[in-house]
Image (spheres, coloured by chain):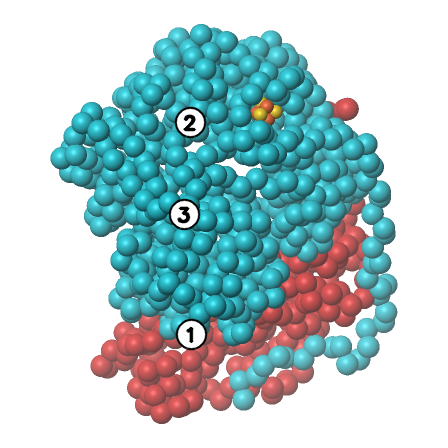
Chain colours: A cyan, B red
Amino acid sequence: MSGQSLFPRLEPLLPRVRKPVQYVGGEGNSTVKPWEPASVRWCLLYPDAYEVGLPNQGLQILYEVLNEQPDVVAERTYAVLPDLEALLREHDIPQFTVDAHRPVGDFDILGVSFATELGYTNLLTVLDLAGIPLRAADRSDEHPLVIAGGHAAFNPEPVADFLDAAVLGDGEQAALDITDVVRAFRAAGSPGGRQELLARLARRRLVYVPAFFDVRYGDDGAIAAVTPNRDDIPARPAKHTLTDLDSWPYPKAPLVPFAETVHERMSVEIFRGCTRGCRFCQAGMITRPVRERSIDTIGAMVEAGLAASGFSEVGLLSLSSADHSEIGELATQLADRYEGTKTSLSLPSTRVDAFNVTLANEFSRNGRRSGLTFAPEGGSERLRKVINKMVSEEDLIRTVSAAYAQGWRQVKLYFMCGLPTETDEDVLGIARLAREVIRAGRAASGQRDIRCTVSIGGFVPKPHTSFQWAGQAPWQVVDQRLQLLRDTVRADREVARAVGFRYHDGRPSIVEGLLARGDRRVGRVIERVWREGGRFDGWSEHFSYERWERAAAAELEPLGVSLDWYTTRDRAEREVLPWDHLDAGLDRDWLWSDWQDALRESDLDDCRWTPCYDCGVCPTMGTQIEIGPTHRKLLPLAPVPSLPEKQPLPEKQVPTSAASAS
Amino acid sequence: MPPRRPDGPPTPPPVARVRLRFAKRGRLRFLSQLDIARTFERGLRRARIPMAYSAGFTPHPKVSWVGGAAPTGAASEAEYVELGLAADVDPEALRAALDAALPPGLDLLACVPAEGSIADRIDGSHWRIRLPGVTETELSRAVAALLARDSVEVERKTKNGPRPVDVRAAVICAVCRAELPDCAILDVVVRHTTPAVRPDDVLTALGVVAVPPLTFPVPPEPTRLEQGLIRADGTLADPLIPNDSDTGRSAGRLPA
Ligand code: SF4
């Protein structure tokens, strides 16, 4: 277990791959610590390409939190692109970290961050390249513990066979507590080996260990029961909830990559959780309750992050950033602070109301002004009631008119297709909205050359949401509705050229649906797809629906279930769902009644400004809503000493040739 | 709030311009020109260099890259960039501050006030290429074969498809020596052409003219040592020193 650098062997291969820069490490604010004498060594994996994984906040936070511990080494690894994968296999070089290029298999813990289910095949590539047996059952004491986290870990059952453990919820404190357990266990001489270590972690309520639970299936194919197979562990592993976010201001020094990545900015998370209650939104359900960072902590994080990174844009992240109790003050005070510095601030997406246009104006006051994004999600008022996204058409038109009138030229509208109860009419509502938006925009701005981009994502029912029982729309239905919508927009001479239309075909959503709501039997499908070459399923150029369909037929049908069974089938109230034994705090009966309310097109308010509606999270988890306002003010920044004025150029500074050919 | 227009008021012209020479070393040789530009922009902000900006909705700091960048994967001791500044600052203080804000491997070697056009002071590059797995004898034979020809064309992939480039015509001089018994070193001065003749092209040309053909078992390691105006003796004048091409220095001298 040496931690020796593989770089000398890797380097000669790099001229032969696309984008070698993503494998060299050395990014701004990256950390390399000595292998000895660390007592616990974490390798953090984002199972997608570097350009997607590097900006991931969860991974950056854990990287920093863990490396702050004097006796902990934390390094990062990402999925290598297929060209390098082939070369690594040819030259027998294992999966490496980008920081010190150490073999991933040498670490104590491989922490995997699953933001989406489409990274599952990449996990298998990484394990295989690292020389770690794919199945947890085949690993020995010399192999790292493979621990998953991230939103997809709230139903880790499809990858249960490949994981030693999963952490539900916020990872900061959990990662430190896991480190403590591992450190103490090793200091005691690792009594009882790997199994005992996992048992200790489970007993401390830190992780869910799939191997400690048995799943029985009934004759109808559904799960009959999930039961723990030891009596010393909790029967319902629960999620972790970080409180007092002000005392966890991470990342303090954002990573600054050389390579182009999907987000060319730094991010500051302004709150965690969301109780708007959008019924499709897994993130909102599993991160409750709302916990805000205060305005002064946010101000300090923005300043520290900018000084440490040199980024020129700051994204104020959360699930619904305009809902921060002091967002208006934040916008104005940050814009004042960065006046004249070409620093722009952005919100990931904005709520549909006029206040948000004012916000966006403030945010872009000192820097770049890109487009404005609104997410009505559903094309008709009826459908928006079903999903509990309460936006009226008048609000939307008023909001975008204000935006166009104030000089914004590009508005992006985000919708979903395939929502429960959706009809062709609902989807055609999107075309009508787009037309109204363009008309209103032309009237408000007095210009014809305004644009509106309509982006449509396929809806995938997710665990721990009110829609967890819903049958997913077949991909053929989604494709046909999108086609109808596109034809309708194209046929509308008046606005066709002003409306951009972005969508994907419906088939990847079906695979995402299989992986999202699957049980342990789906693991065989994942493994077969991977063995047949499946990689990077989130990338349209690598994704093959046929491969998934074939593998699902081969692996599931002998067991009496199918791809359809997992995706397009409605579930009954009492069916045991694969994730029912995992506690996100949500009361199952409340979720079911919310599902029934959805079908009745009945909406629900936010518990931040109306009384608690008993979703169950706060009492179950012992947490409460943490919001402002604090009424504190950001102080202007102290002036920075500038570079000295120019002096006459001394003789010795005349540059000489740095190297010569002698 | 009044509407903001992309054209807006024009930004003031730069108060001063400086010219920097920098190196791209070690593992950072795998940075592309875009990666370098991105890293510079962030370094400039971290170092709080008072940059002049372009106008518009997406203001950019005034950074001009001089000439053709060393290709991704090639190291360099002689890349050049010009900065437009919003304040007149001491070039050495700027160099030190920016160097400290850039990662090791992107190293600033010199900074001078910009005078005249630097593009007019660069028409050639001196490359040194390490060739592990190639002996000096093999390399010398190939170099002699190349120099004996009037023209050796190789295909270069460009944005507009493959284009033939005449490597022989661009090579001013080429010298070989042995670093180790099984590692030869090639020093070559090439004239800048369009498209540029890169180290890869030189090696491809050497590969095809040699009898038997020369192959490279290990990826060659090119480093650009100098750029400048090619003097009559095959050395390069330093583009940061006005009129250096007249001084007849011999520092970069290569026997022809
Ligand atoms: S328990 Fe009540 S207050 Fe807490 S998140 Fe649920 S609805 Fe809101």
User: SS at mark 2?
Assistant: strand
3D distance between C-alphas at marks 1 and 3: 35 Å
Q: Give me the C-alpha separation between circle 1 and circle 2.
A: 46 Å
Instruction: Determine whether B75 is above or below A337 in the image.
Output: below
Compared across the picture, whether A442 is left or right of A558 comes to right
Callout 3: few (<14), some (14-19), or many (20+) C-alpha neighbours within 10 Å?
few
Mark 1 is on which residue type? Ser
Nearest to the observer: residue B247 or residue A429? A429
Asked if both marks, 3 and 2, belong to the same chain, the answer given is yes
Residue closest to the far left: A558
Residue with the mark numbered 2: A457
State the image coordinates of residue A103 (x, y, percent, origin top left): 40, 67
Q: Which residue is mark 1?
A: A2
On the image, which quarter does residue A226 sit in?
top left
Which residue is denoted by mark 3 in the rendering?
Answer: A232
Kindly check if marks 3 and 2 are in contact, taking CB atoms under 8 A apart as contact: no
Ranked by sequence position, the earlier of labels 3 and 2 is 3
Q: Is residue A113 visible?
A: no
The amino acid sitting under disc 3 is Asp
Q: Is residue A644 left or right of residue A151?
A: right
Judged by depth in the image, the label closer to the viewer, 1 or 2, is 1
- Percent of width and height locating residue A243: 64, 40
Q: Position of residue A300 (x, y in %)?
A: 74, 46
Q: Is mark 2 within 8 Å of ligand 1?
A: no
Q: What secondary structure is marked by label 1?
A: loop
The image quadrant of residue A237 is top left
* Amino acid at the residue labelled 2: Gly
Mark 1 vs mark 3: give the one in front.
3
* Image quarter of the N terminus of chain A: bottom left
**Chain letter belonging to callout 2:** A
Closest to the camera, between mark 3 and mark 2, is: 3
Q: Is residue A35 above or below residue A117?
A: below
